């Protein structure tokens, strides 16, 4: 019985050896494999390895026989290829809402999907800019609690921190307690947001996950979604994100912009290849029509293009852009006049 258990353990350890210690540049021969098995307290004979490898291949592991640069075996493909591991690692490093310590821990876990040799090369290229990372170590617990509440349809009570200017022009944090009806978690504009309703208002609001702490799931049911937005039964995440600019809330309307052809790439990057394009006000211009939330976020998006983008409609948005431009000009005029 003990021998049977040892044989099963041997197969599991052998699979781990191929995952962690072999790749196309690092081939393991029988002696290498036996040494790794012995390090794990498992004795093995050369002859038995052939049948063990055959079983792992039958299980689905892509164990390849090699003859050069040396004779042996290596794992040809994995659950995550090296390029995929790199993408996941880079995404975690770029996520501002993950603290430096949790970034390192996550990157280490992701590196485990590659061989140790590939992981070493990945770690050589890791750079974590702590200046851009949040310091909230509760974020995993917050996400878990919020996800639980969303799935159960329950309200939450949480603390929300904002930075305010303190004495001697130093930033300090202030926290307030809120009771919310949570509907979705969204990653947008390099930040992670909770989409929720504050019971004092009849709309949706956005809450940065990195500013949330001390989440408590309550017994009260969430407010019905149709009471606070246009969705009837469930929250449509894809539709919602597509209409928001910089995650600002506001009223939804059809928007048309008259654009210079030189910003076509930026427009397609934002709205996709199938966006509604038409002839513009001049041969070198085009118009684009889309549905969006009319808000300060949309105003900022449009103003980044300067004279290359002009609002055709709605009139409300035209006025908002003109007013924003007026206030910017006024601010510079005051500065030049020493005011």
Image (spheres, rainbow, N blue to C red):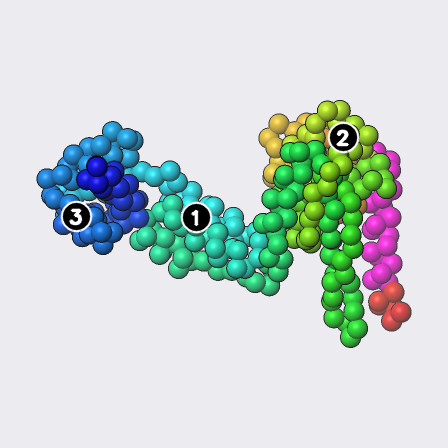
Q: Secondary structure at mark 2?
A: helix
Query: Of marks 3 and 2, which one's residue comes earlier in the chain?
Result: 3
Q: Which residues are magenta?
A: 304-333
Name the residue at 75% across, 24% down. Answer: 232
Residue 111 appears at what percent x and percent y?
Answer: 40, 50
Q: Nearer the viewer, mark 1 or mark 3?
A: 3
Residue 208 shown in magenta: no
State the mark number for residue 225. Answer: 2
Residue 117 appears at what percent x and percent y?
Answer: 31, 53
View extreme (bottom): residue: 168
Q: Which residue is mark 1?
A: 110
Residue 23 appears at what percent x and percent y?
Answer: 27, 46
Which of the 4 image quarters holds residue 10? top left
Query: Of marks 1 and 3, which one's residue comes earlier in the chain?
Result: 3
Prevailing secondary structure class for the magenta stretch in the rendered image: helix
Q: Secondary structure at mark 1?
A: helix
Q: Is residue 224 above or below residue 126?
A: above
Task: Please give left or right for residue 313 compared with residue 105 in the image.
Answer: right
As measured in the structure, the alpha-carbon distance from the residue carrying label 1 to the one carrying label 2 is 36 Å
Name the residue at 39% across, 40% down. Answer: 80
């Amino acid at each position: 019985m003990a021998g049977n258990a040892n044989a099963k353990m041997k197969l599991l350890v052998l699979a781990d050896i191929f995952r962690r210690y072999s790749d196309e540049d690092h081939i393991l021969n029988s002696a290498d494999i036996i040494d790794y098995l012995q390090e794990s307290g498992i004795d093995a004979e050369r002859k038995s390895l052939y049948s063990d490898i055959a079983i792992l291949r039958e299980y689905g592991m892509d164990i390849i026989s090699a003859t050069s640069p040396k004779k042996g075996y290596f794992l040809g493909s994995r659950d995550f290829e090296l390029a995929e591991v790199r993408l996941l690692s880079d995404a975690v490093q770029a996520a501002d809402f993950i603290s430096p310590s949790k970034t390192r821990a996550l990157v280490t876990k992701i590196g485990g999907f590659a061989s140790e040799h590939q992981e070493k090369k990945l770690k050589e290229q890791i750079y974590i800019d702590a200046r851009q990372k949040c310091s909230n170590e509760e974020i995993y617990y917050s996400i878990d609690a919020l996800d639980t509440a969303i799935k159960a349809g329950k309200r939450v009570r949480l603390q929300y921190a904002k930075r305010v200017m303190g004495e001697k022009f130093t930033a300090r944090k202030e926290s307030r307690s809120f009771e919310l009806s949570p509907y979705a978690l969204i990653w947008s504009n390099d930040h992670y947001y909770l989409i929720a309703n504050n019971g004092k208002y009849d709309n949706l609001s956005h809450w940065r996950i990195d500013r949330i702490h001390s989440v408590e799931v309550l017994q009260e049911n969430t407010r019905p979604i149709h009471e606070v937005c246009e969705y009837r039964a469930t929250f449509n995440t894809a539709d919602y994100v597509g209409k928001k600019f910089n995650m600002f809330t506001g009223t939804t309307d059809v928007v048309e912009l008259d654009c210079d052809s030189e910003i076509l790439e930026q427009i397609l990057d934002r709205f996709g290849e199938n966006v509604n394009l038409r002839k513009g006000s001049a041969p070198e211009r085009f118009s684009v029509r889309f549905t969006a939330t009319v808000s300060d976020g949309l105003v900022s998006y449009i103003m980044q293009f300067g004279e290359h983008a002009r609002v055709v409609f709605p009139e409300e948005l035209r006025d908002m852009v003109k007013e924003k431009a007026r206030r910017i000009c006024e601010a510079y005029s005051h500065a030049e006049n020493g005011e």
